[in-house]
Image (cartoon, rainbow, N blue to C red):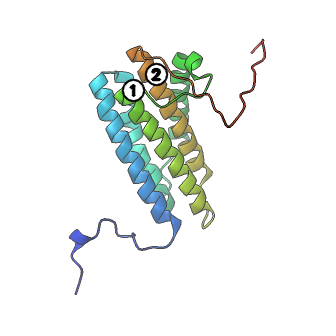
Amino acid sequence: MKKDARYSCYPFMREKISTVDFEIRTDSLTTHIGVALAAVKAEEVEVVGADLLTILPMAYHVNGSVRGKLAVTEEDLSWLSGRYDFYVGHVKEQIQNFVLPQGTGAATALHLCRSEAKKSYRVLHKVSEEREVPAILFDYLGLLANVFFVMAVYMNQQAGIAEIPFISKSYPMKKKKENE
């Protein structure tokens, strides 16, 4: 007797390979991006909203690119790199140090996306220990985490909220040279 599909949330759930964990993790990433998009729309910062609408389906393309056909292209990576440069151009002064994940609802949602992208990258590494993984997926997820960070700082900047630097008690801070 065939089991009723309503009791299965994901057809590969019982597989032992790390690909399953990667797909579940990137699904979580995509869901967090959707939450961030709603928060960005509520704060009416159109440029970030438009970028998230492009990134949102890309997260699912990253998801499927391990088990299925590679769906992330050099053009996708180049576009994301350009968006990183755009945001850094606006927040360069605020990102000279590590900052606490705080601020507007959209900024904190984007910090969650950053964290989810890093978790996805880590699980992708586990997958790469079991099978061949295209390098572009690592590049895309690493850059994506950094894009979410600068987007979060940009959202706070747009709202007039100052970043709070994180001062580590565990790692000494290197002094910057005078001419930097």
Question: Where residue 81 sits in the image (x, y, percent)?
Answer: 55, 32
The quadrant of the image that shows the N terminus is bottom left
Residue 165: which numbered mark, if any?
none
| In this picture, residue 46 sits left or right of residue 98 | left
Q: Residue at x 37, y 25 (%)?
A: 104
Q: Position of residue 93 (x, y in %)?
A: 58, 16
Label 2 Cα crowd, 10 Å radius (few <14 / some 14-19 / many 20+): many
- Which of the 4 image quarters holds residue 9? bottom left
Task: Find numbered disc 2 in the image and state the secondary structure of the residue it sits on.
Answer: helix
Look at the picture and state if 173 lies above or below 159: below
Q: Is residue 4 above or below residue 131?
A: below
Residue 55 spot, x, y in % from top left:
42, 38
Nearest the camera: 68 or 89?
Answer: 89
Which residue is nearer to you in this view: 114 or 4? 114
Mark 2 residue type: Tyr
Tell me: 167 left or right of 44: right
Pick whichever of labels 2 and 1 is earlier in the sequence.
Answer: 1
Q: Is residue 115 left or right of residue 180?
A: left
Q: Compared to 8, does 137 lie above or below?
A: above
In the rendered image, residue 143, in percent from the top left (x then y), is placed at: 56, 38
Circle nearer the viewer, 2 or 1: 2
Please state if 52 lies on the left or on the right of 81 as rendered: left
Q: Find out whether the residues at labels 2 and 1 contact each other: C-beta distance under 8 Å.
A: yes
Can you name the residue that lies furthest to the bottom here? 1
Which residue position holds label 2? 154
Amino acid tagged 1: Val
Picture residue at 30% right of the left edge, 21% below the top: 44
Q: Residues within 10 Å of mark 1 (few under 14, many from 20)?
A: many
Res 48 label:
1
The image quarter in which residue 98 lies? top right
Quadrant showing the C terminus: top right
